[in-house]
Amino acid sequence: MFLIGGESGVLFIHGFTGSPHDFEYMARKVHEAGFTVSVPRLPGHGTCGEDFLKTTANDWLRRSFDAYYDLKTVCEDVHIVGLSMGGVIALIMASILKPKKLVTLAAATHLRDDRIKIAWLVSLFKKKIPKDSSQVYNDPDYEFLNKEYWSFNWPKQASELYKLIKTARKSVGQIVSNTLVIAARNDNLVPLKAAQFIYDNVRSEKKKLLIFEQSGHVLSNDVEKEAVTEAVIDWLKG
C-alpha cells in the first residue's frame, strides 16, 4: 500500500509472519489525517511458507530501508511505525536514520517464549513444525496467513528474528527520535517489560509509554484499534 498525501510520510512495518493487512485500518486513517503512507510487504511474507523459508533478517531489513528511502523521495520527513518484529526493525532503523518520530507497537525486543534462543539448533533438523491448533479466522486474508504461516513454527526464521532482536536491544540507546511506545496488557507473545525496556533506554527528549488494557498482540487490528490509531495520529501530528 502506498497512498500519496501530505509532505510528511509514515512508513509502517508489519510483523513476523504478518502482512500489510495488519495496518489496513491504521494506515488509511493516518492517510486521511494528511500523511503520505507506505506499507511494504516484507520478503517471504503474505505469499506462501516456501517463500518465507528463503528469506533472512537481512532481506527484511533491506526491504524496510528501501521503502524508507522510496518514501523520502516524495516526503520532506518520514516517520516510522513498527509492529512486533516491525517494531524491532523500526528501532534499528531509527538508531541509524534518526527520524523525527518513531512509534512501536508491541515491539518484540523481548518474548515470553525463550525457546527462540535455541531456534538455530532446532533449524538444523526441522525447517517448519506443525502446530496443534484448530484456530479458524473469518477474515479470508487472515485465514490464508493462518494456513500458510501461523499453523507452523518456523525455527530457521525464528533464529533470523532473534538476530534482529539482539541488534535492536543494542540499538535502542542510539535513538533520539520522539518516541511513542505502545503495548498491550493481553499480549501473549511480547511481555510488558519489552515496552518498558524501550522507554527506559531511548535517549529521546520526548517519549511516551501507553498500555492498552483490552488488546492482544496485533494492536493495530484488535478491539481497541480505533483508540490505538488515534493515539498514533496524535503523536505524529503533535
Image: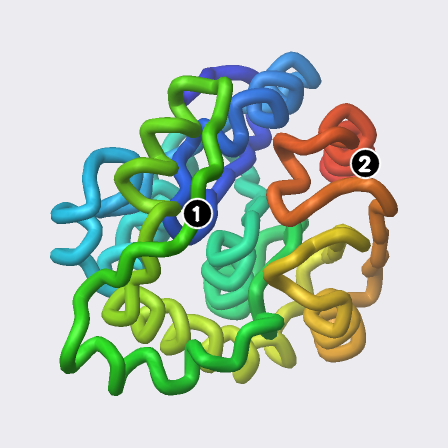
Residue drawn at 40 percent across, 53 percent down: 132
Residue drawn at 42 percent across, 32 percent down: 20
On the image, the x and y values in percent for residue 94 come to: 54, 61
On the image, the x and y values in percent for residue 47 come to: 22, 34
Choose top left, top right, bottom left or bottom right for residue 125: bottom left
Nearer-the-camera pick, 5 or 202: 202
Q: Where's the C terminus, which quadrant?
A: top right
Is 59 placed above or below 49 here?
below
Please, what secondary structure does the residue beneath circle 2 have?
Answer: helix
Residue drawn at 40 percent across, 18 percent down: 140
| Of marks 2 and 1, the one in the foreground | 1
Q: Amino acid at mark 2?
A: Ala
**Label 2 vs 1, first from the N-terminus:** 1
Q: Where's the N terminus, which quadrant?
A: top left
Q: Are marks 2 and 1 in contact (CB under 8 Å)?
A: no
The residue that mark 2 highlights is: 231
Is 104 placed above or below 34 here?
below
Nearer-the-camera pick, 232 or 196: 196
The residue that mark 1 highlights is: 133
